[in-house]
Image (tube, grey):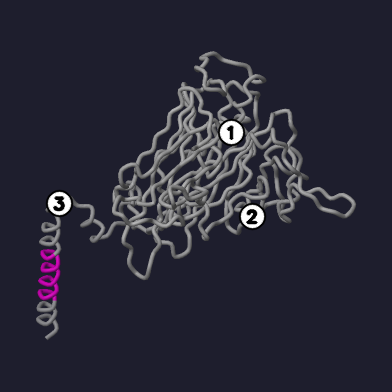
Amino acid sequence: MWGLRFVGLLSCCCCLTSQQERAGPRAVSVKCGEDLLLVMANRDFFGTNRLVSASELRLGAAGCNVSRLEQEGQAVVFEYGLHECGSTVQMTPHELVYTTHLYYVPTVTGIIVRTNPVTVTIKCRYPRVQNVSSDAVKPTWVSYNSTKRTEQHLAFTLRLMNDDWSRERTSNVYILGDLLHIEAAVETSNVLPLRLYIDRCVATPTALKTTDVKYSVIDYNGCLLDSKAEGTASSFLMSRLEMNRLQFTLDTFKFYKDERNMIYLHCDLKVSTVDQLPNELNKACSFEKASAKWIPVDGTEDICNCCDSGTCGFLSRRGETRRWRMTPRQSEWEGSSVLGPLIVQDYVDQKPVMALSLDDSYHMDIHDAVEHLPEGADNMVMVLSLSITGSVICFALIGFVLYKKLYH
């Protein structure tokens, strides 16, 4: 029924990640092809004899729709390319792992919901080196020219870095006003040296890229639009450590009236050979506020001139405007990656803790002294204060009596 050739020693799996619901038996089945992914989901998703709507099911971070219905409408089928729908790729020493998710998002009717959202994780595993037939895997290294399918197995990644870019950040929680340090990379083992670019990045409050609420961070084939926003410090790093890596900073933000305080960053990435000069289609440009102009990481400044007009990749000839088209070979060097969720919390103003030196310790008054005393010492201070106050009153009364006797 599926009409596929399968790759030797290929495996696939799917697992339910929601803690609120449990899908019914055999609710989801997956078949991984050479470059095609087929997912079939039973519309009786929870085994309760209640069919979910096809529109409530989406595949991948891109939110791909159902391709068709089967089994007399009882099942839905998603049929997409392995790289489509926002799937991610992880490269291990022995295999490539393509990961995507099947989302069930129930329709909200009125003010109640009867089911919770469910996420099913789908993984397709491929040996690192393999032929394109069903023959056994050949565990030998092969040259770039004879491994055409390797072009489709480039592993694009996004990750958070610490402030000095020395290692990966372990926390995804930020305070509003912090600066995100993001690194995009591509695995380039066993292929020609490649230069990485970020075509576009869209921020959303959910894992679905197709949501109506979104913010364009990078667009027009590599223009970091957020770097031109007022009051931001967002920018590409102007020097690359390696050609297959690209780093940029991004000011934190929140979506208006969205109490989830979460951000997902969906990025389309691509590579070119390092000997190919940067151009309007392959670039990384930031807006430098001091000079009020766009600056590229690589190449000449004129490749960034289209960032304001949004006409990057268009050529004019005889008064006509036409779009540059990527060749099939170039399109195979593209991929996508999702970073998130990033949790952005409101800034909470806290009373600063003062550290006093010996030179300024005399500025402390009696109240400051009480705050710095060890536990239990405040009662002693209170007694001492009352004693001093009583002594002062006594001396004042004695003085007043003596004054009356001397002058009267």
Magenta stretch: give its range: 386-399
Q: Which of the two marks, 3 or 2, is nearer to us in this view?
A: 2
Which SS does the magenta portion mostly show? helix
* Residue at 60% over, 16% down: 142
> Which label number is shown at residue 375?
3
Q: Earlier in the sequence, mark 3 or mark 2?
A: 2
Q: Position of residue 89 (x, y in %)?
A: 50, 34
Q: Amino acid at mark 2?
A: Lys
Quarter-of-image position of residue 396: bottom left
Q: What SS does tag 3 mark?
A: loop
Label 2, residues with CA under 10 Å away: few <14, some 14-19, many ≥20? many
* Residue at 51% over, 28% down: 6
Q: Which of the two marks, 2 or 1, is nearer to us in this view?
A: 1
Residue at the limit of the structure toward the top, as seen here: 140
Q: Position of residue 165 (x, y in %)?
A: 51, 36
Q: Does the magenta segment cover residue 391? A: yes
| 43 versus 14 height, above or below | below
Residue denoted by label 2: 228
Q: Answer yes or no: do the residues labelled 3 and 2 have beta carbons within 8 Å?
A: no
Q: Nearer the viewer, residue 357 or 199?
A: 199
Q: Does the magenta segment cover residue 230? A: no
Q: Is residue 52 visible?
A: yes
Q: Position of residue 219 (x, y in %)?
A: 64, 50
Residue denoted by label 1: 245
Q: Nearer the viewer, residue 9 or 316?
A: 9
- The quarter of the image holding the C terminus is bottom left
For the image, the number of numbered tags is: 3
Q: Answer yes or no: do the residues labelled 2 and 1 have beta carbons within 8 Å?
A: no
Q: Amino acid at mark 3?
A: Glu
Q: What SS does tag 2 mark?
A: helix
Q: Earlier in the sequence, mark 2 or mark 1?
A: 2
Q: Amino acid at mark 1?
A: Arg
